């Protein structure tokens, strides 16, 4: 399964470029443009590494680093347009794993990212994904609705995790099979559809009118963030 990279940077053009570049290198990339959104995404998806800008519109990247280190060992690479040595030292002292001043060559960022991922960060602080009444415990490989386990096969669990980790984004059948089995789907391979149908039977209130896993006709599937009140985002 692709390693998940969270980019927290308010430069949308830079984020789009890094998303495209890192995705081509096999990573699953999520971008957030504020400290608040970035911290929320970290709690929700427990990424494998974070690329964090020092200057954010609602908080300093240093403050974000402090918050992350309260309960997580996730590898952090800090970015900044300011190259002063004091910034670098403070960032590293607060728990950042590496530091890269802007502008930079994406190839250098990729090399540093691979290095911090190889070092490892002790795994995600919170292995459980939560979406309202639904809990997906990646460590225990358990799926719960209202605290009650719902049976899934190992392959179905991996498909659900692959969708949930990309909540809010359309995922094609090929991408799902690549993520969980490392192989592309054939033109008429309906394996994913059958498994998704079984997953819906386990986690949807009404599998015939699914609210968590929605079929995007001609595109793939969309995992929505259904809240306790039934709303989705």
Image (cartoon, helix red, strand yellow):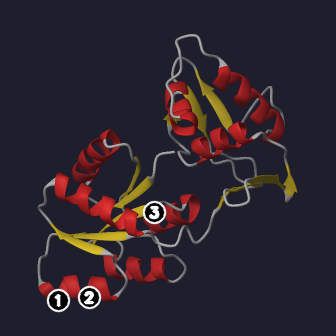
Residue 170 x %, y %? 51, 34
Secondary element type, mark 2 = helix
* Label drawn at residue 90: 2
Locate residue 202: give its quadrant: top right
Residue depicted at 54% across the width and 68% down the height: 123
Which of the two discs, 3 and 2, sits closer to the camera?
Answer: 2
Residue depicted at 33% across the width and 81% down the height: 62
Confirm or deny contact between disc 3 and disc 1 (CB under 8 A).
no
Q: Is residue 64 left or right of residue 179?
A: left
Residue 81 x %, y %? 15, 70
Any part of residue 60 in sight:
no
Residue at image mark 3: 37
Question: What is the crowding at mark 3: few (fewer than 14 residues within 10 Å), some, or many (at least 20)?
Answer: some
Residue at image mark 1: 86
Question: What is the crowding at mark 1: few (fewer than 14 residues within 10 Å), some, or many (at least 20)?
Answer: few
Any part of residue 170 in sight:
yes
Most foreground residue, 59 or 146: 146
Q: Is residue 157 left or right of residue 185?
A: right
On screen, residue 93 above or below 81 = below
Marks 1 and 2, Cα distance to the nearest angstrom? 6 Å
On screen, residue 199 above or below 136 = above
Secondary element type, mark 3 = helix
Marks 3 and 2, Cα distance to the nearest angstrom? 23 Å
Confirm or deny contact between disc 3 and disc 2 (CB under 8 A).
no
Marks 3 and 1, Cα distance to the nearest angstrom? 27 Å
Most foreground residue, 159 or 34: 159
């Amino acid at each position: 399964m692709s390693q998940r990279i969270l980019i927290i940077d308010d430069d949308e053009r830079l984020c789009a470029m890094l998303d495209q570049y890192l995705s081509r290198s096999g990573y699953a990339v999520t971008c957030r443009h504020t400290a608040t959104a970035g911290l929320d995404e970290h709690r929700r998806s427990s990424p494998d590494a974070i690329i964090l800008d020092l200057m954010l519109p609602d908080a300093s990247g240093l403050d974000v680093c402090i918050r992350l280190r309260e309960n997580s060992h996730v590898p952090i690479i800090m970015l900044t347009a300011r190259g002063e040595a004091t910034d670098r030292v403070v960032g590293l002292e607060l728990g950042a794993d590496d530091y890269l001043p802007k502008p930079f060559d994406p190839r250098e960022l990729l090399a540093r990212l691979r290095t911090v991922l190889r070092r490892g960060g002790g795994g995600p602080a919170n292995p459980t994904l939560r979406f309202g009444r639904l809990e997906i415990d990646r460590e225990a490989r358990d799926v719960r609705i209202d605290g009650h386990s719902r049976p899934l096969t190992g392959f179905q669990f991996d498909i659900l995790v692959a969708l949930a980790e990309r909540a809010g984004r359309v995922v094609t059948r090929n991408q799902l099979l690549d993520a969980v089995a490392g192989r592309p789907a054939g033109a008429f391979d309906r394996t994913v559809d059958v498994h998704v149908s079984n997953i819906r039977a386990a986690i949807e209130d009404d599998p015939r009118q699914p609210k968590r896993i929605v079929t995007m006709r001609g595109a793939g599937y969309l995992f929505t963030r259904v809240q306790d009140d039934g709303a989705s985002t």
